[in-house]
């Protein structure tokens, strides 16, 4: 089966750094996604990790450890527009299954 | 990049009526389309997977007779919520995957359904 766990909510300050963790259990690993979703909108793709290590894309970085079943999304230099839900997701068969998402609140 | 168009973006209907939501891949052929439902402050829950020309595969707990999915072509899938009730009010999102990039999803903009 596929269990995906991430914190329900987090709060951080504008300009700061925040790390959103995700742990997963899967019978076969085919990569891990991170998506950003603003309220009332569709998710937007942030990253896809297949190999262990850190991948950096501007202010956002994503880390994966397959042996630990663990990933995190790192957001630097937080901006107010980063207030959103961040969804961790893993492929299963031909589908993508989403975690419950982490709602990130940014304080000025 | 690949574009998925979803219509309508918002619909309000009376209880007992049926609502059709369309999902189109505009510049690519979508081998597979997925339908998700999302309640407020909750994550995306996969409802069904549809492949062109074949019957949809529904997730456990999703009533196939209530949520009719048709995938008549490689660019169009429709979801019909039949005899809608207030508890069906939700955000419905479709997504499509590329034939050679099955691991990457492209999402429609979503449909907010409100059943009175």
Image (cartoon, coloured by chain):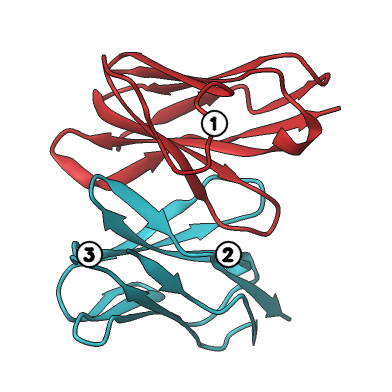
Against B13, is A44 above or below?
A: below
The answer to whether the residue labelled 1 contacts the one labelled 2, judged by CB atoms less than 8 Å apart, is: no
Q: Chain of mark 3?
A: A
**SS label for mark 3:** loop
- Residue A42 pos. (x, y %): 53, 45
Per the image, the residue denoted by label 1 is B63
Q: Which mark is residue A99?
A: none
| Residue lying at 33% horizontally and 44% vertically, measured from the top left | B105
Quarter of the rendering occupied by the C terminus of chain B: top right
Q: Classify mark 1: helix, strand or loop.
A: loop
Above or below, B103 against A15 in this view is above
Q: Quadrant of residue A31?
A: bottom left
Q: Which chain is cyan?
A: A
Gap between marks 1 and 3 measured at Cα: 30 Å
Out of A26 and B31, give the one closest to the viewer: A26
Spot occupied by residue A36 in the image (x, y as percentages of width and height): 49, 60
* Residue located 18% across and 62% down the image: A30
Q: CA distance from mark 1 to mark 2?
A: 28 Å
């Amino acid at each position: 089966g596929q269990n995906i766990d991430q914190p329900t909510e987090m709060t951080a300050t504008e300009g700061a750094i925040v790390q959103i963790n995700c742990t997963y259990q899967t019978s076969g690993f085919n990569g891990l996604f991170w998506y950003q979703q603003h309220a009332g909108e569709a998710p937007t793709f942030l990253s896809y990790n297949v190999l262990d290590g850190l991948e950096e894309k501007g202010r956002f970085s994503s880390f994966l450890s397959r042996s630990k079943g663990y990933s995190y999304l790192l957001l630097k230099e937080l901006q107010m527009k980063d207030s959103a839900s961040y969804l961790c997701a893993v492929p299963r068969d031909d589908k993508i299954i989403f975690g419950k998402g982490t709602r990130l609140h940014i304080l000025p | 990049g690949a574009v998925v168009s979803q219509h309508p973006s918002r619909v309000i209907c009376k209880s007992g009526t049926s609502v059709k939501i369309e999902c189109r891949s505009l510049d690519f052929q979508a081998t597979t389309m997925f339908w998700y439902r999302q309640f407020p402050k909750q994550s995306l829950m996969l409802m069904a997977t549809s492949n062109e020309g074949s019957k949809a595969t529904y997730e456990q707990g999703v009533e196939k007779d209530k949520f009719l999915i048709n995938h008549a072509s490689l660019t169009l899938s429709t979801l019909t919520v039949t005899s809608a009730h207030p508890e069906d009010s939700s955000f419905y999102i479709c997504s499509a995957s590329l034939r050679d990039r099955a691991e990457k999803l492209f999402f429609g903009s979503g449909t907010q359904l409100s059943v009175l």
